[in-house]
Image: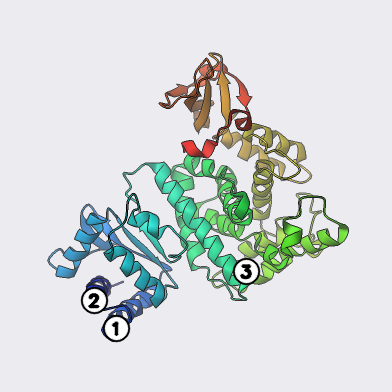
Amino acid sequence: MTEEIARQLVQGFVSSLKGLKLYPLQHPALARQIQTFLSVLQSCHQVNAALRIGLHDGVLVVDDLLISDNIPAAEDLSKLLQRLELTGLQFDAGMSEDEFSRLLSVLTTPTKGDQSVESLLATKDFPHVHPLIQESEQETLSSRAVYGRALKVVDNIFQDVRLGKIPSSAEAVSVMGDMVKLMISEPDTLFALSMLKDYDNYTFTHSVNVSVISLAVGRACGLNEEQLRTLGLGALLHDLGKLKVDVAIITKPGRLTAEEFAEIKKHPGDGAALVVEMEGISPEVVDIVLGHHLRFDRSGYPGSAQRQVMSAMIDMTAIADTYDALTTLRSYQRPQTPRNATEKLREIAGTALHPDYVEKFILSLGTYPVGTLVRLDSNEIGLVIKVEVREQEAVKLKILFDSSGNRLTDLPLVELIGAETARIVGEVDPFTKGVDVTEYF
């Protein structure tokens, strides 16, 4: 991007904001300003699927280009972002005039009560706009924001498929970049969010959770950043073919009939057929979608793929898919705790799951994985919020219950290093204590 293009973007953005104060949304003058901005934005998206306009050390930047303060539009936009307590905005490819018009309205309309512009933009009404979060903010907030974006991306892709459209890959590629960066820099906070389970929107959360867990598996197996992006994207799209299956079969609480299971077994092939039509999708991503139900011994389904040479990433996704299934409440099972889930993975390693990948994944989680509720020898109950495997099982806990069983409001932090982890005398089922562990990350 040239400096001239960057200035055009800023000028077009500010002109549209000012135009909304002068004209109604339907006015031709405002429509021209909006079209001018979107035309420049679309030309930028031909090079990069995502573009960021925001503040860096108080100076306005467009991607990596600094915009001089002596340009009035840059000064106006900087003041607006500061007033709205936004670090900036990311624009993904595919934004329509309607969505941009709604964005202008949000940015120029005072918020009500405890609402913030950031929370308004986090809704599904803005699939191509994402608020940027200050690097100095708590890492859990940025993790939740990225996780929320991923849910929106899956929702949008699924809606496109239901409407018979070929989904855009731009949003998924963009959010996957952020997910990978978080998994590399702060894996505990992102991995903990994979314990979020929205039972009313199970398919959305399952897709995102399997993607997060697959990144943890891939990281444990030594994949580089580019490989992690591929793995995470394939895992995010792995169940796309289920949209072709009758929803009554997908949501059936009891055992499936042979005919119903035959329909379920079609979803990897159907998903691969959808994904291959999406722009910029690599063969490895298609492999993941097609092969995520192939077992390590290459039984499983679809049968037509059993003898194909496929990416090793299908085995990593299978581990993530299994782990998420084990830790999710179903009509026929209570959710397993993280530690019990890893024991189940070991039981089926070598036949259903890749044994080496399973061991590396479990080793990376530690004896008491993040999200595990544990009882100490003092009878206090704490939640594992960080694991440092390199320090021989060093863990950091938030104490949720005191030694008398009283639930605490101020949560002391306790760090156990090396032999001190012997103070942990057992695992506690969060269900029995009424604890939603994701509230503490």
Q: Position of residue 196 (x, y in %)?
A: 56, 45
Q: Position of residue 374 (x, y in %)?
A: 57, 25
SS type, badge 2: helix
3 or 2: mark nearer the eye: 2
Q: Residue at x 68, y 32 (%)?
A: 340
Q: Going from the N terminus, do you reach mark 3 or mark 1 first? A: 1
Residue at which label 3 appears: 275
SS type, badge 3: helix
Q: Residue at x 70, y 56 (%)?
A: 292
Q: Is residue 150 above or below residue 283?
A: above
Q: Position of residue 143 (x, y in %)?
A: 44, 47
Q: Position of residue 81 (x, y in %)?
A: 25, 58
Q: Residue at x 29, y 86 (%)?
A: 28
Residue at which label 1 appears: 27
Q: Amino acid at mark 1?
A: His
Q: Disc 3 to disc 2, how far (Cα)?
A: 40 Å
Is residue 124 visible in the rendered structure shown here? yes
Confirm or deny contact between disc 1 and disc 2 (CB under 8 A).
yes
Q: Amino acid at mark 3?
A: Val
Is residue 46 visible in the rendered structure shown here? no
Confirm or deny contact between disc 3 and disc 2 (CB under 8 A).
no
Few, some or many residues within 10 Å of mark 2 (<14, 14–19, 20+)? many
Few, some or many residues within 10 Å of mark 1 (<14, 14–19, 20+)? few
Q: To which quarter of the image does residue 38 belong? A: bottom left
Few, some or many residues within 10 Å of mark 3 (<14, 14–19, 20+)? many
Q: Amino acid at mark 2?
A: Gly
Q: Disc 1 to disc 2, how far (Cα)?
A: 9 Å
Number of numbered discs overlaid on the protein picture: 3
Residue at which label 2 appears: 19
Spot the residue most to the left.
70
Q: Going from the N terminus, do you reach mark 1 or mark 2 first? A: 2
Spot the residue most to the right.
258
